[in-house]
């Protein structure tokens, strides 16, 4: 059975990003949570609230890729690819006769691997937040 395409990070992953201090107000989508029915639905940000309930930002893959730095430490470049049956998001130095990987994150989905890299970048100060000082 083919896995259903994942359009956005789930509520738990979004809460991890917010807890890490990331301002997620630029998210393309939102999870709408109906406390009365206990249901979640995905809606475009700015669309009329579908009813009473909580709205939680929801990052798409494009949202995450826009937040990731193009390079870290001025020399490790962001690379995305496949490694066997998993997606890989990494920062790599490629120079004459040298390939050095600073960090690599893997996932079954590209969205998951990119989110793990975004969390790593936040934790290591490469993406500024209100918790690490400059966002």
Image (spheres, grey):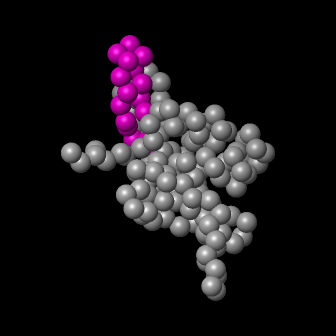
Q: Quadrant of the N terminus?
A: top left
**Foreground of the two, 49 or 42:** 42
| Residue 11: x %, y % from top left | 47, 33
**Foreground of the two, 29 or 71:** 71
Q: Residue furthest top?
A: 36
Q: Residue furthest bottom?
A: 96
Can I make out residue 109 in this image?
Answer: yes
The relative height of residue 17 versus residue 90 in the rendered view (above or below) is above
Give me the residue at 47% from left, 24% from top. Answer: 54
Give me the residue at 59% from left, 50% from top. Answer: 118
Per the picture, the main secondary structure of the magenta-coloured stretch is strand
| Residue 74: x %, y % from top left | 72, 70
Q: Residue furthest right?
A: 133
The range drawn in magenta is: 28-44
Give me the residue at 71% from left, 51% from top. Answer: 124
Could you tell whether 112 is left or right of 95 in the image? Answer: left
Rendering quarter of residue 66: bottom right
Give me the residue at 49% from left, 54% from top. Answer: 106
**Foreground of the two, 44 or 75:** 75
| Residue 40: x %, y % from top left | 38, 27
| Residue 131: x %, y % from top left | 74, 39
The relative height of residue 74 versus residue 117 in the rendered view (above or below) is below
Does residue 128 belong to the magenta stretch?
no
Q: How many marks?
A: 0
Could you tell whether 134 is left or right of 13 in the image? Answer: right
Can I make out residue 52 in this image?
Answer: no
**Foreground of the two, 83 or 113:** 83
Could you tell whether 76 is left or right of 14 in the image? Answer: right
């Amino acid at each position: 059975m083919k896995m259903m395409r994942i359009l956005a990070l789930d509520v738990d992953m979004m809460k991890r990003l917010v807890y890490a201090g990331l301002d997620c107000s630029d998210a393309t989508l939102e999870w709408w949570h109906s406390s009365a029915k206990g249901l979640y639905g995905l809606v475009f940000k700015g669309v009329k609230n579908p009813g009473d309930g909580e709205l939680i930002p929801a990052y798409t893959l494009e949202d995450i890729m826009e937040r990731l730095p193009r390079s870290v430490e001025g020399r490790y470049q962001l690379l995305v690819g496949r490694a066997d049956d998993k997606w890989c998001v990494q920062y790599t130095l490629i120079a004459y006769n040298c390939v050095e990987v600073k960090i690599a994150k893997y996932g079954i989905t590209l969205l998951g691997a990119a989110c793990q890299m975004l969390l790593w970048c936040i934790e290591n100060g490469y993406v500024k937040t209100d918790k690490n000082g400059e966002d």
